[in-house]
Image: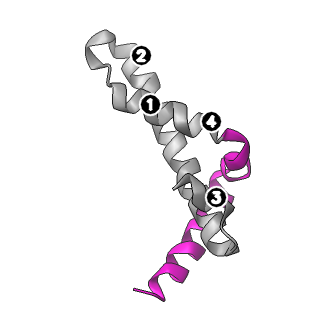
Amino acid sequence: MPPLTHCDDAIVRDGVCAYLADALNKAEAREATRSAEGWSSYQIADELVLQRLRGLADTLAAYRDAGRRDATLQRFHRYAYLWY
């Protein structure tokens, strides 16, 4: 999905950025929970996803705001369902 953050279609580009920003928030929350639980809850896949998403942090920064992210995702979902 990261290549779609450069899509010419603004609705797709913004929607993907909002989706990935949401995924970043969830991955950070999982990391915090797992850190508190200790080594037995460690999952390498979660760590790799978090690293990849953090690498996109500058691109996703505008969508870390919940209000903007939710509105953008709603617009993206409406647009996507036109093709469904």
Residue 3: which quarter of the image? bottom right
Q: Kindly identify the amino acid type of the residue bearing the numbered disc 3.
A: Thr
Q: Kindly identify the amino acid type of the residue bearing the numbered disc 1.
A: Leu
Marks 2, 4: nearer the viewer: 4
Q: Which residue lies furthest to the bottom in this view?
A: 82
Quarter of the picture holding the C terminus: bottom left
First reached walking from the N terminus: tag 2 or tag 3: 3
Residue 73: which quarter of the image? bottom right
Query: Gap between marks 2 and 1, in whole Å?
Result: 15 Å
Q: Is the magenta stretch mostly helix, strand or loop?
A: helix
In this orientation, which residue lies closer to the viewer: 2 or 84? 2
In this orientation, which residue lies closer to the viewer: 6 or 37? 6
Residue linked to disc 1: 48
| Identity of the residue drawn at 45% across and 87% down | 83
Query: Gap between marks 1 and 3, in whole Å?
Result: 19 Å
First reached walking from the N terminus: tag 4 or tag 3: 3
Residue 48 higher or lower than 18, as above or below? above
* Segment tinted magenta in the rendering: 57-84
Q: Kindly identify the amino acid type of the residue bearing the numbered disc 4.
A: Gly
First reached walking from the N terminus: tag 1 or tag 3: 3
Residue linked to disc 3: 5
Marks 2, 1: nearer the viewer: 1
Kind of element beneath mark 2:
helix
Residue linked to disc 2: 35
First reached walking from the N terminus: tag 1 or tag 4: 1
Kind of element beneath mark 1:
helix
Residue linked to disc 4: 55
- Could you say where residue 71 lies in the image, as x and y percent from the top left? 63, 67
